[in-house]
């Protein structure tokens, strides 16, 4: 199975010019949107913890050992240029042929959904972005747009599903696997007050525990049986009590 590590921004201190949230808010929502499509197309994944930091994300990625590390961000213009820059930028480590290949394929897909697709750019870097040089897997650092530009910020906010689909298709192209539309998939979010939710082998509290789900984790609901859902998750397929799963799509 091909695998991906998603590392959405932790930067709550970067507000969108629209006033509707932060970079961390929207990039974590983007990772949420990407998760069902990856799972349904047979891609295993892990994800950074929003309560952690960049060092924690790199360590978790390296322990997971994915085929590709994907860092999700939105950008801000430099001083004196506020609100004047726009467009997705995909960064890759200059000495990584695989990082470049992934960046090119994701850029090609983003260019089909961004209103000015010809402005999507690829940017090689030296060592200024830790997630590109300290991860064991090939990595890309995606800036999906400029959150201090009103047009870009509004596009990101209103287009998360299509942005997620474009990035997923670029990832699938990199992994050399087919990608199918996931329209109509039932998606849920784990909602528990403490601890973890058991993922079981059958719809019974007496069945074997085969994994655990964290609060806020995104899952695909495959089918419903009385009091239980069969789920597709980062831990594979299993059953969990439906009262702890809130449908979101």
Image (cartoon, grey):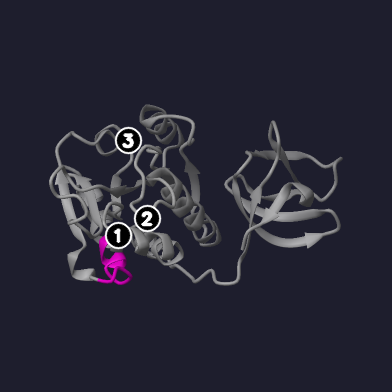
Query: Which quadrant holds the C terminus?
Result: bottom right
* Sequence order check, earlier mark of 3 and 1: 3
Separation of residues labelled 2 and 3 (CA atoms) = 37 Å
Tell me if 61 is positioned left or right of 189 in this view: left
Q: Residue at x 26, y 66 (%)?
A: 108
Question: What residue is disc 3 on?
Answer: 136
- Could you tell me which secondary element the residue under label 2 belongs to? loop
Separation of residues labelled 3 and 1 (CA atoms) = 36 Å
User: x, y (%) of residue 79?
Assistant: 15, 42
Can residue 1 be seen from the camera position used here?
no
Q: Nearer the viewer, residue 238 or 157?
A: 157
User: x, y (%) of residue 177?
Assistant: 41, 63
Residue 134 sits in which quadrant? top left
Say whether residue 111 is magenta. yes
Question: What residue is disc 2 on?
Answer: 18
Q: Residue at x 48, y 52 (%)?
A: 29
- Could you tell me which secondary element the residue under label 3 belongs to? loop
Question: What residue is disc 1 on?
Answer: 150
Can residue 187 be seen from the camera position used here?
yes
Say whether residue 137 is magenta. no
* Sequence order check, earlier mark of 2 and 1: 2
Q: Which mark is residue 105?
A: none
* Sequence order check, earlier mark of 2 and 3: 2
Say if mark 2 contacts mark 1, CB within 8 Å.
yes
User: x, y (%) of residue 88?
Assistant: 25, 58
Tell me if 215 is positioned left or right of 35 in this view: right
Magenta residues span 107-115
């Amino acid at each position: 199975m091909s695998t991906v590590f998603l590392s959405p921004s932790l930067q709550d201190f970067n507000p969108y010019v629209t006033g509707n949230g932060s970079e961390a808010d929207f990039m974590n929502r983007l990772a949420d949107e990407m998760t069902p499509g990856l799972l349904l197309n047979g891609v295993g994944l892990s994800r950074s913890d929003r309560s952690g930091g960049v060092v924690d994300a790199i360590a978790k990625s390296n322990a997971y050992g994915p085929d590709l590390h994907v860092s999700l961000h939105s950008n801000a213009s430099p001083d004196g240029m506020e609100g004047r820059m726009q467009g997705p930028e995909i960064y890759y480590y200059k000495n990584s042929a695989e990082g470049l290949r992934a960046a090119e394929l994701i850029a090609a897909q983003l260019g089909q959904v961004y209103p000015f697709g010809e402005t999507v750019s690829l940017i090689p870097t030296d060592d200024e972005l830790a997630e590109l040089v300290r991860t064991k897997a090939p990595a890309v650092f995606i800036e999906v747009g400029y959150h201090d530009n009103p047009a870009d910020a509004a596009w990101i906010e209103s287009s998360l599903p299509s942005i997620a689909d474009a990035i997923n298709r670029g990832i699938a192209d990199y992994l050399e696997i087919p990608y199918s539309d996931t329209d109509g998939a039932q998606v849920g979010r784990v909602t528990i007050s403490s601890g973890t939710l058991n993922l079981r082998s059958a719809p019974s509290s007496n069945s074997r525990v085969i994994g655990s789900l964290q609060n806020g984790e995104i899952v695909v609901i495959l089918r419903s049986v009385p009091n239980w859902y069969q789920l597709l998750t980062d831990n594979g397929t299993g059953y969990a009590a439906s009262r702890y799963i809130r449908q979101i799509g």
